[in-house]
Amino acid sequence: MNERIKELAEQAGLYVGVQVAHGVELERFTELVRQDERKACFAIVETYPTVRAMSIAIRARGEK
């Protein structure tokens, strides 16, 4: 598992690799992942001068 995902899982109160998430913890984890992805996309937007370059970079991020 990616280190950032482990960190987000810990922040959400999940037990990584031992128990399956459920309920509130799973919802919190999902929101943390969304927030992290939005931050990454904003960083891309700030880096590229054109909308086309931004869209290419954001799409490429999803293909990793």
Image: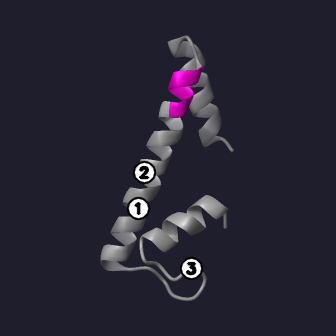
In the image, 11: left or right of 28? right
Marks 2 and 3, the one that precedes in the sequence: 3
The answer to whether marks 2 and 1 mark residues whose Cβ atoms lie closer than 8 Å is: yes
The answer to whether marks 1 and 3 mark residues whose Cβ atoms lie closer than 8 Å is: no
In the image, 27: left or right of 53? left
Please name the residue shown 60% across and 41% down the image: 62
Looking at numbered disc 1 in the image, what kind of residue is underneath it?
Thr
Marks 1 and 3, the one that precedes in the sequence: 3
Considering every residue shown, the one lying at the far left of the view is: 24
Q: Please state the extent of the stretch shown in magenta in the rendering.
A: 43-47
Q: Is residue 59 above or below residue 17?
A: above
Q: What element carries label 1?
A: helix
Residues packed near mark 3 inside 10 Å, few (<14), some (14 to 19) or many (20 plus): some
- Residue labelled with disc 3: 16
Q: Position of residue 49 (x, y in %)?
A: 56, 12
Magenta segment, prevailing SS (helix, strand or loop): helix
Considering every residue shown, the one lying at the far bottom of the view is: 18
Q: Is mark 2 on a helix, strand or loop?
A: helix
- Residue labelled with disc 1: 30
In the image, 50: left or right of 12? right
Q: In this view, does 32 lie above or below 24?
A: above
Q: In this view, does 14 lie above or below 32?
A: below
Task: Find out whether residue 22 is within the magenta segment.
Answer: no
Please name the residue shown 34% across and 67% down the image: 27
Residues packed near mark 1 inside 10 Å, few (<14), some (14 to 19) or many (20 plus): some
From the image, which quarter does the C terminus lie in? top right
Looking at numbered disc 2 in the image, what kind of residue is underneath it?
Arg
Residues packed near mark 2 inside 10 Å, few (<14), some (14 to 19) or many (20 plus): few
- Residue labelled with disc 2: 34
Please name the residue shown 30% across and 75% down the image: 24
Q: Where is residue 25 in the image (x, y as percent from the top left)?
A: 37, 75
From the image, which quarter does the N terminus lie in? bottom right
